[in-house]
Image (tube, rainbow, N blue to C red):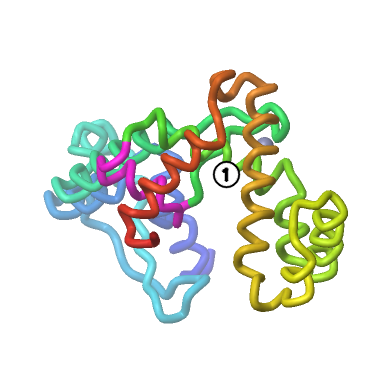
Amino acid sequence: MSKKEEIKHKYSYKSTIKKKYNLTDYQIDQAIEKGLIKDYRYVPNPHYSSKKSLIINSQELLQHLEEIRKLEKYSEGEKKKRKEYNKRSRKVSQISFYCPLCDAKIRPLKDSYTRDAVLNDTMDYENAKKVVIVTHFRHKHTNYDIIRKDRREFINYLEQKYKEQKIEIYKLQYFLEYEDKLKELLKNEKTEEAIELAKKYGLLPPNFSKEEYDRIALKIKKMYGLS
Ligand SMILES: [Zn+2]
């Protein structure tokens, strides 16, 4: 056996060991610190040349495995972080819902104000969840995004609204000037559509109205200085 092969045979990467024996970084760090693992070394990382990887004598590790397993799994800092993380995910799961159309659990978007407000305890779960449901339905289960993001679709939509006498001709003629207002019209209409659809699937109370949604949405907007 060549020296290189011998090393390969005798030592295992820390990542492999962690997986194979269900150990944590902190347990391995402590095992080294306490001298339970004495035969280890750092080698160039096979994936990142700038980093080093820890390799450990797996025979020696096996001899002390039970002892190493009894060591604390996480450092105080890690424990605090995990606790905080779990607390946050519990809050987020309170305002997540199962969407039957997507057949998936829908969580609020990471950058959403609603999620932020709930994480900061400035908004109750019940209202926040309603916003998450309506927002998801508006974006995913109406053609809101298709119309909003495509100029031609948007113009077609506006012409249709003109025919239905929902907008005045001057707003169409001075389209650019009224663009924001017209987009608001689209948003309002698609929000209503989203609410009705979500109700059909029993995700919102039957008496939930667009006005109620607007009240909640306005509260969030004010909270973040958007209105
Ligand atoms: Zn969906």
Which quadrant contains ligand 1?
top right
Residue 114 image position (x, y, % from top left): 41, 46
Q: Is residue 116 magenta?
A: yes
Q: Is residue 3 above or below residue 79?
A: below
Which of 96 and 200 lies nearest the eye of the viewer?
200
Which of 191 and 4 lies nearest the eye of the viewer?
191
Q: Residue at x 33, y 58 (%)?
A: 224
Q: Is residue 42 magenta?
A: no
Q: Residue at x 31, y 44 (%)?
A: 119
Which of 9 and 101 lies nearest the eye of the viewer?
101
Question: Which SS class for mark 1?
Answer: helix
Disc 1 under 8 Å from ligand 1? The reply is no
Q: Is residue 139 above or below residue 41?
A: above
Give the residue furthest to the bottom. 50
Residue 221 image position (x, y, % from top left): 39, 54
Which residue has dot 1 on it?
135
The image quarter containing residue 209 is: top right
Please state, as top left, top right, bottom left or bottom right, where the C terminus lies in the image. Answer: bottom left
Q: Is residue 60 left or right of residue 191?
A: left
Q: Is residue 146 left or right of residue 196?
A: right
Q: Is residue 2 left or right of residue 169?
A: left
Residue 193 image position (x, y, % from top left): 70, 38
Q: Residue at x 42, y 37 (%)?
A: 128
Amino acid residing under circle 1: Thr
Q: Which residues are magenta?
A: 110-123
